[in-house]
Image (cartoon, rainbow, N blue to C red):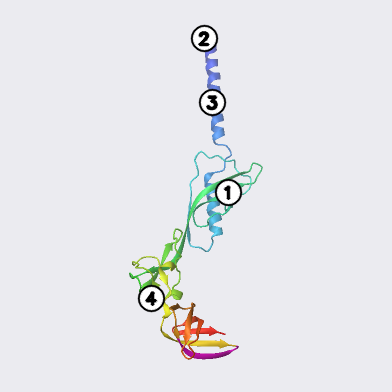
Amino acid sequence: MLPRKPATIAVCCGLILFLISGIASSRSGPFQSHQSIRQVVATFVQEELAGEDIELEVGALDDRLRLSRCDIDLEAFWPPSARRLGRGSVGVRCNDSKPWRMFVRVNIKGYESIAVLKTSKVRGEALLASDITYERRDVTTLRDKFLTRTDAVTGYIFRRSVKAGQVVALRMLKAPHVVKRGEQVQIVADSNGIQVTMKGEAMANGTRGSVIRVRNSSSNRIVEGEVVDKGVVRVRF
């Protein structure tokens, strides 16, 4: 029996090597590399948001994920109702004979040059052009409507006190009254291309564009008109 022992050992060793080789082969099979999937996502986002100031973070894939290598180019896509900015995901699919689809986590930060206060302001103060500086900020997580220009709101009044360094949001401001109740105003009446100007009295405070009641100083008649400028109300007949 002793002469047959080496042969038995050789067979066993050969079987073990075969099994090990088979396992190694299955683990190094034709899988799609994680790096190639993440690169497809990065290229897709950069092309979709070309021209925008963004910073992209593509999430890592689970090390246990094994997907068959795609015989054609991978295709990336936005999931239904996907957010373009912020935390979300981008889909990647393979449409060859062994199709698959997956989603990759992304974090897309969007940057804009927005208005920031250089000095603190108290409630009731007006916004001046000299109060503003513009800084590149991540606007992805900003909930309030920020301003990229302040031309249209210069002179607006702060609703509350605001500290220097804060982003200027539209909800912080309110339009100033350009007409005040009891104030003498100029009533401009338009009728069929004919314009008549008369004196009147404002019956309420008014911001530019608002509609208020005014009393004609000559006839005491009360009419409604649009505030078009400081001390000027236009009435149409």
Disc 3 marks a residue whose amino acid type is Leu
Q: Nearer the viewer, residue 55 or 200?
A: 200
Q: Quadrant of the N terminus?
A: top right
Instruction: Say the numbered circle drawn on residue 32.
Output: none
How far is mark 4 from mark 2, CA to CA? Answer: 103 Å
Q: Earlier in the sequence, mark 1 or mark 3?
A: 3
Q: Nearer the viewer, mark 1 or mark 2?
A: 1
Q: Earlier in the sequence, mark 4 or mark 2?
A: 2
For disc 1, the marked residue is 92
Q: Earlier in the sequence, mark 4 or mark 1?
A: 1
Instruction: Say the numbered circle drawn on residue 17.
Output: 3
Disc 2 marks a residue whose amino acid type is Leu
Q: Nearer the viewer, mark 1 or mark 3?
A: 1
How far is mark 4 from mark 1, CA to CA? Answer: 49 Å
Residue 154 location (% of width, % of height): 42, 76
How far is mark 1 from mark 3, CA to CA? Answer: 38 Å
For the residue labelled by badge 3, is the local secondary structure a helix, a strand or a loop? helix
Q: Residue at x 42, y 65 (%)?
A: 136
Q: Is residue 172 above or below residue 216?
A: above
Asked whether 195 falls inside the magenta stretch, the response is yes
Residue 97 location (% of width, % of height): 66, 42
Q: Residue at x 58, y 48 (%)?
A: 92
Quarter of the rendering containing residue 173: bottom left
Q: Nearer the viewer, residue 18 or 104?
A: 104
Q: Residues within 10 Å of mark 2 (few under 14, many from 20)?
A: few
For disc 4, the marked residue is 128
How far is mark 1 from mark 2, CA to CA? Answer: 61 Å
Q: Earlier in the sequence, mark 2 or mark 3?
A: 2
For disc 2, the marked residue is 2
